[in-house]
Image (cartoon, helix red, strand yellow):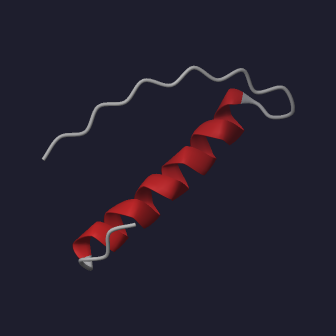
């Protein structure tokens, strides 16, 4: 299954690297939930 999303963000209080790190952690949590059979 493929997912596509487009996001436009203008972070004012964090760098792009910090924002990317947060997104990466959220993606890892989402994949773990998917593998465990949990859909949110």
Q: Position of 12 compared to 29: left or right?
A: right
Q: x%, y% of residue 9?
A: 64, 23
Q: x%, y% of residue 23?
A: 54, 46
Q: Residue at x 24, y 72 (%)?
A: 35
Figure check: 30 above or below 2: below
Q: Which residue appears farthest toward the bottom when viewing the image?
A: 36
Q: Which residue appears farthest toward the right when viewing the image?
A: 13
Q: x%, y% of residue 31?
A: 33, 62
Q: Residue at x 66, y 38 (%)?
A: 19
Q: x%, y% of residue 37?
A: 23, 77
Figure check: 4 above or below 8: below
Q: Position of 26 compared to 35: left or right?
A: right
Residue 36 location, quadrant: bottom left
Q: Residue at x 35, y 72 (%)?
A: 33
Q: Residue at x 76, y 30 (%)?
A: 15
Q: Quadrant of the C terminus?
A: bottom left
Q: Which residue appears farthest toward the front when viewing the image?
A: 40
Q: Position of 21 compared to 40: left or right?
A: right
């Amino acid at each position: 299954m493929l997912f596509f999303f487009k996001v436009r963000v203008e972070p004012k209080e964090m760098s792009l690297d910090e924002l990317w790190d947060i997104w990466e952690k959220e993606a890892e949590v989402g994949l773990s939930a998917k593998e465990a059979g949990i859909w949110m």
